[in-house]
Image (spheres, rainbow, N blue to C red):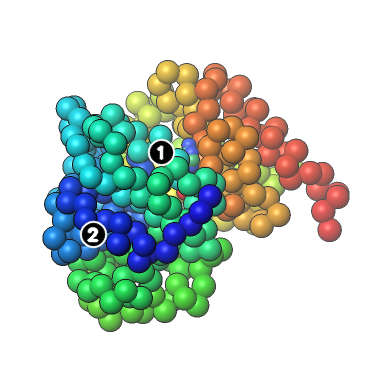
């Protein structure tokens, strides 16, 4: 796969009027923030830009500036001259957005997932960056593209959440420099952090309680996992966006090297969220075995099968990837 530099992408888009910007389903702030910032940039260059996400704009992130730009795709397909996919490791993670694109537009992808094999005509994939928004922010800064306070806030929210508040693997001096530059450009860090991290609905605490009470520790306590069945969802009254981040509470336990979250989905599918805390365990490689992908320390997959059997199969695969505890020095 050949990577292109950002100026080549900007040049390719110059002559294309109608552009669709899109990002992955089950969106997080990197999916939203990078897509909103890119939309504002492309509009400032005179393009007609549409921004779609399968899930539309989740209430949880509606505080992001210009969040009203995000809509769910329509039922009738629409033609575009180009599609810019952001933070989306495989095309099918765009979900129903794919069904709403008519004709054959130029495909461009900007992403930071290691598992991205480059499905677009022009790909800028940089797994060394902890967030797609960092790739974009650096590109805007290098190219002298004006970053408005709205764009800066979206980019900062994306970088902050994808790095676990500037902590996770992949966070570098450059990440802090980009963050500092975005603050200078107008981010109100305390207000944004309060909205991102201290504004959870009470029902999410019910989910956290469920996760803590039902947590399983396997592979000699090196793996922590919890499962959420459709019946649990009904009982707890939670919605999909409540799940995000709960797994981090299990990963944070001393001695735990991997944390897994199993969510029962309709149609005999199970959604797996996998986290690693030990660089020698690559969550992305494991999720790839099950048709998914992501990053070495945070990955996911959707697996067909019975809820219980999928859990046992995945836990067994993690156990064999970790190897025997005695073998570890
Ligand atoms: P999640 O556990 O859903 O928060 O996802 C963790 C990371 O893995 C994110 O970067 C996702 O984009 C990626 N990911 C999650 N599910 C899949 C999947 N089914 N296929 C490819 N990548 C995925």
The percent position of residue 147, horizontal first and vertical second, equals 24, 72
55 to 29, vertically: above or below:
above
Q: Is mark 1 within 8 Å of ligand 1?
A: no
Where in the figure is residue 301, as x and y percent of width and height? 51, 36
- Circle 1 — which element? helix
Measuring from the top left, give residue 77's x and y in whole percent.
Answer: 20, 30
Is the C terminus in the top left, top right, bottom left or bottom right quadrant? bottom right
241 or 123, which is in the foreground?
123
22 with respect to 126 (left or right)? left
Q: Say which of 325 and 91 sits in front.
A: 91
Label 2, on which residue?
Answer: 14
Give the residue displayed 40% in from the left and 42% down from the top.
243
Which residue: 23% across, 45% down?
A: 81
The reply to whether residue 65 is in sight is no
Q: Residues within 10 Å of mark 1 (few under 14, many from 20)?
A: some
Q: Quadrant of residue 214?
A: top right
Q: CA distance from mark 1 to mark 2?
A: 23 Å
Q: Nearer the viewer, residue 139 or 64?
A: 139
Residue occupying the far bottom of the picture: 184
Q: At x 86% / y 49%, what residue is drawn?
A: 326
Residue extending farthest to the front is 15
Q: Nearer the viewer, mark 1 or mark 2?
A: 2
The residue that disc 1 covers is 91
Element on which disc 2 rests:
helix
Examine the rendering and report whether any part of residue 171 can be seen. Answer: yes
């Amino acid at each position: 796969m050949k990577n292109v530099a950002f100026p080549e992408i900007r040049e390719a888009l110059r002559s294309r009027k109608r552009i669709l910007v899109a990002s992955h389903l089950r969106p997080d702030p990197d999916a939203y923030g990078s897509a909103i910032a890119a939309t504002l940039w492309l509009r400032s260059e005179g393009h007609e830009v549409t921004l779609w996400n399968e899930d539309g704009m989740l209430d949880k992130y509606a505080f992001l500036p210009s969040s009203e730009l995000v809509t769910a795709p329509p039922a009738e397909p629409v033609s575009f001259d180009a599609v810019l996919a952001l933070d989306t490791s495989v095309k099918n993670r765009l979900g129903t957005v794919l069904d709403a694109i008519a004709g054959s537009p130029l495909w461009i992808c900007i992403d930071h997932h290691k598992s991205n094999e480059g499905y677009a005509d022009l790909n800028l994939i940089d797994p060394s960056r902890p967030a797609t928004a960092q790739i974009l922010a650096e590109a805007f800064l290098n190219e002298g593209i004006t970053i408005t306070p709205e764009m800066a806030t979206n980019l900062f929210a994306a970088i902050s959440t994808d790095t676990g508040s500037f902590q996770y693997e992949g966070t570098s001096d450059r990440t802090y420099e980009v963050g500092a530059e975005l603050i200078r450009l107008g981010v109100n860090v305390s207000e944004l952090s309060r909205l991102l991290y201290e504004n959870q609905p009470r029902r999410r605490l019910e989910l956290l309680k469920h996760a803590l009470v039902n947590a399983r520790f396997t592979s000699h306590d090196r793996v922590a996992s919890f499962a959420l069945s459709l019946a649990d969802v009904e009982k707890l009254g939670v919605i999909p966006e409540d799940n995000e981040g709960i797994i981090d509470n299990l990963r944070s336990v001393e001695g735990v090297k991997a944390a897994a979250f199993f969510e029962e989905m309709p149609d005999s599918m199970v959604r797996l969220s996998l986290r690693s805390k030990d660089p020698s365990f690559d969550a992305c490689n494991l999720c790839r075995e099950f048709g998914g992908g992501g990053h070495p320390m945070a990955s996911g997959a959707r697996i067909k099968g019975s809820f219980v059997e999928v859990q046992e199969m995945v836990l067994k695969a993690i156990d064999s990837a970790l190897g025997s505890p005695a073998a570890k020095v």
